[in-house]
Image (cartoon, rainbow, N blue to C red):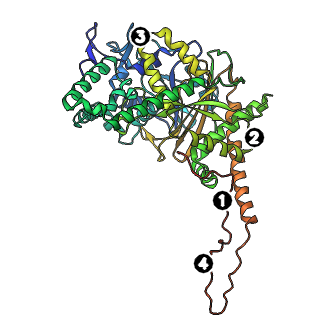
Amino acid sequence: MASRKRTATGGGQHERMSAVDTAWLRMDGPGNAMMIVSVMATATPVRTADLRRVIETRLLCFPRFRRRVETDQLGASWIEDENFDLDAHIVVTELPGQGGPRELQALAAALASQRFDPARPLWQLHFIERYGTGSAWVLRLHHCYADGIAMIRVLLSLTEQDAGPGLAGAQQAESRARRSSQRKGVPDPLRLLDWVTQLSQPAGDIVESALAEGARLLETGVHRLFHPETAAAVALQASGMIGEFARVVALPDDPPSPLRAPLSGEKGVSWSEPLDLQEVKAVSRALGCTVNDVLMSTLAGALGAYLRAEGFDTKGLSLRASVPVNLREAEEAMTLGNKFGLLFVELPVGVANPLQRAYTMHDTMRELKGSQQPPLTLTVLGLLGMMPNVVQGPAIELFSRKGSLVASNVPGPQAPLYLCGQRIAEMHFWVPQSGSIGVGASILSYAGKVFFGLIADRACIADPAQVVDRLAPEFERLLLAATVGLLGMEQRKPRAKAARKAPGKAVGSKRAPVAGKPRRSRRAPTTPGNT
């Protein structure tokens, strides 16, 4: 693709940034910096020299991490940093005081409030060689490099899981996948309307792709585009997107609450003790819900309990969370860039009863199944990235007023990972909050544990620990309610009477209920949603 790489004025190579990535680059504001923040810790110490070697061999194999960003009137480009200095991106530091979780959280909060040096590649890693019995680090990366799903996979490539060599060849694999897709014979006319794919490419690639598709359509017969079945599919796709856009725009602004306040730009970070994933799964099975329903319900319960403790009336209150949804194809798993959409999810923070809250959450997620919101929001971001920056700000604010927080839920690896031979004991991450949203929640499952974390502007939540400290108690309330509910159904269930057999007559075909087997609760949902 000749349009992707050209010789820069300084003699290096540069790559045009995609429209979606450009939109994220422009989204930096006085209250929010568009950066992904990740915190990890190992059970035993990692040597600085070993970490540096891993970064050199497994992170810098992605050329983009050696490139800085240069903007112009039409967008932005990735420019090779001819003065790249790894020491400017790996900062070895020590924590003050006792050097425990509180101090690490304070460091992550301070870094989340700092901007990157625009003259260098927009990422940095702060390494603490001595943290507890092991080591810890805070990695920051601007969102224009990649979305949260891609970054989780990049972080996993630093571990001893045979991902490094595979990721080192990611570009070759991506090129092979592109060539394979180009050899698939007759083109699908619907690709001409696939903005989700096209807007994830540089602008030059969009033009080239459209011209190439047009040429192939002429070769294979334009009549395919106007076939009744194709026309119906195109009309259905277009009407679905237009209808979803109208519904999203018509959503009212999220109701006023302490979570919506003018942003100060100062962040706070906190995380809770992890939950046991098997217990979460047991509760989800008992209630007929999904793991995601249980976790989002627990988050809603903690937020509601916090608001009530602050004296805010939550009766009948629901707050929307903007939830990232991965839109990558399987063959795109190891590529950088942003390819995700957003889903606006109602959190029943005003429902104090844990069972009712879980069922309400389940019903909400079931109704959103198959929603067009994720591809729609990705399309809108791509279009904004192609427009002047003056248009993007008001549009982003229009969408951000419809939610009070960003909530991401990522299922991580369930086998322990190792960095430089040392087991990773915990991991946390936060995606940025855009526009006027000041609260971000993260849920990450790893090695049989579920890690909750919260990042918030101090004007919205002065101390995020006041929320995360309520997560475990809220889950315990749900676990207890589910257990008592099942036991109650067992006790109320009448035992089956033994069937009497008349002489010479067979027992009737009507089957008696099985003793001790609980009936399904009328309030329990009948169909589980996506996990």
Disc number placed over residue 509 in the picture, else none: 4
In the rendering, at what x and y percent does residue 468 appear?
Answer: 67, 34
Instruction: Name the residue at the bottom extreme.
Output: 503
Question: Relative to 342, is 21 above or below?
Answer: above
Q: Residues within 10 Å of mark 1 (few under 14, many from 20)?
A: some
Sequence-first disc among 2 and 3 = 3
**Disc 1 versus disc 3: distance between alpha carbons?**
62 Å
Which one is in front in this view, the residue at disc 4 or the one at disc 1?
A: 4
Sequence-first disc among 4 and 1 = 4
Task: Locate residue 439: give its quadrant.
Answer: top right
* Tag 1: amino acid: Arg
Instruction: Name the residue at the right extreme.
Output: 311
In the rendering, at what x and y percent does residue 424 appear?
Answer: 49, 40
Task: Locate residue 497: give its quadrant.
Answer: bottom right
Which residue carries the number 1 mark?
A: 520
Residue 190 visible in the current orientation: yes
Which residue carries the number 2 mark?
A: 352
* Tag 3: amino acid: Ala
**Residue sitting at x 51%, y 31%:** 373
**Residue sitting at x 57%, y 43%:** 366
**Disc 2 versus disc 1: distance between alpha carbons?**
23 Å
Q: Secondary structure at mark 3?
A: loop
Which one is in front in this view, the residue at disc 4 or the one at disc 2?
A: 4
**Disc 3 versus disc 4: distance between alpha carbons?**
81 Å
**Disc 4 versus disc 2: distance between alpha carbons?**
46 Å
Sequence-first disc among 4 and 2 = 2
Residue 107 visible in the current orientation: no
Sequence-first disc among 3 and 4 = 3
Which residue carries the number 3 mark?
A: 119
